[in-house]
Each structure stands twice: as C-alpha cells, then as structure tokens.
Image: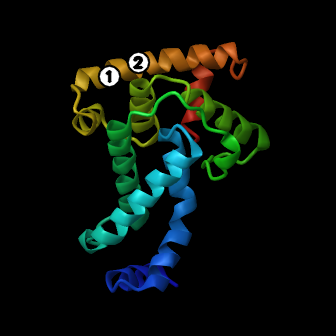
Amino acid sequence: MTEQAIIAGCLQNETIAQKALYDKYSPKMLAVCYRFAQSREDAEDMLQEAFIKVFTQIHSFRNEGVFEGWIRRIIVHTCINSLKKNQKFNEHINLEYAQNIQVKEESIASILQGKQIIECIRLLPLGYKTVLNLYAIEGYSHREIGQMLEIGESTSRSQFTRAKIMLETILVKRKIIEKPTDAFATLATI
C-alpha cells in the first residue's frame, strides 16, 4: 500500500489503512518516544496516544512537506505534553527495547556508542534531557522549545548548555568518550 493510499484510507477511517500506517511508522516513532520516556511502558503509552492524535488529525495534513515529519511532530508534542502531565522522572529504561534507534553510520561500534549516549542522555534531569533532545536531535530552535515547554528562550539555551556539560561528564566517566567533543559528533549521527 502506497503512502498516498494509506493516507486516503485513513481519511475514510479504514482499519486496514490505519494498521498499515501504524506498522510503517510505529518502529521509528517508538524510538523517538524512548528518548523522552522513562520506561518502556511510558514510551509505548506516548506512542499510542500520539497515534490516536495522528488518526484523528490526519485530515489536517495538507501534503506540504513529508508525511513522516508531520507524524514525528505529533509524536514529539505528545511526548512533551505527557512529560508535563505525568512528571515521571526517576525510572530507567532498558535499552534492549530501543531496537529502532536511528544511526546514520552503520558500524557496530557506532551503533553501540549511539545507544550508550542515548542511555546517558536518559540520566540527565528532565529539563536538561528534554531540551537536549528537542534541540540537538529533533532540530527545534530555542524559541520553539521555549514555546513548547512554556519557558524563556534564554532558559532553553542555558538548559542546553548545562545538559551538554553534564552529558559530556557522564560520557567521560563511563569511558564512552575520551574528550567532550566526541559526544556531540556521535550525537549528530543519531
């Protein structure tokens, strides 16, 4: 089923099209949720809530831009809203469930290092982790992050700077990197 056929079917509330959409995009979107969530169950809850929004709001997709990007924005916003609402911050996720972390470079060493960096990002305080994910990985501006999180743009910048310093410290202590600049070179490939 083509993407256009999936969209058309979802607009008609066809379950076959909805399943095809979910099957096609849920693995990548679950990986996005894992970066924000504190447990596998939280990530799955975020994903389910986001896909409900995708199905109910699909009529607002205007074929401007990439459909996957439209879905990803819904996923990210759902994750942020869930974090604001639930405030679950102290659990740790088992990364064996994060099977779909996207890594541009396909060597085993880079995949392992990417997963280790994601695991270390998850150790950051909520504000740091959220801003780091939104800015460094999702590509939002500090202005957009400020609006999403209802904080000032300067607060977003300082949270990012502090997150970067704390992440580099964790990565060096865990001997994942030797010098701080390695972390963000690898982070850019995730």
Q: In the rendered image, is residue 180 in sight?
A: no
Q: Mark 1 points at which residue?
A: 157
Give me the residue at 71% from left, 45% from top. Answer: 96
Q: Which label belongs to residue 108?
A: none
Q: Position of residue 17 (x, y in %)?
A: 46, 82
Q: How many marks?
A: 2
Q: Which amino acid does label 1 sit on?
A: Arg
Q: Where is residue 151 in the image (x, y as percent from the top left)?
A: 23, 28
Return the residue nearer the eye: 87 or 152.
87
Q: In the rendered image, is residue 188 in sight?
A: yes
Give me the residue at 42% from left, 24% from top. Answer: 128
Is 157 placed left or right of 100 in the picture? Answer: left
Give me the residue at 44% from left, 34% from top. Answer: 88
Q: Position of residue 181 (x, y in %)?
A: 58, 20
Q: What element carries label 1?
A: helix
Mark 1 packing: few (<14 Cα in 10 Å), some, or many (20+)? some
Residue 127: image quadrant is: top left
Q: Is mark 2 on a helix, strand or loop?
A: helix
Q: Which amino acid does label 2 sit on?
A: Thr
Q: Do the residues labelled 2 and 1 touch (CB within 8 Å)?
A: yes
Mark 2 packing: few (<14 Cα in 10 Å), some, or many (20+)? some
Quadrant into which the C terminus falls: top right
Q: Position of residue 63 (x, y in %)?
A: 30, 72
Marks 2 and 1, how far apart in space?
6 Å
Give me the residue at 50% from left, 23% from top. Answer: 124
Residue 69: image quadrant is: bottom left
Is 150 placed left or right of 73 in the picture? Answer: left
Q: Which label belongs to residue 161?
A: 2
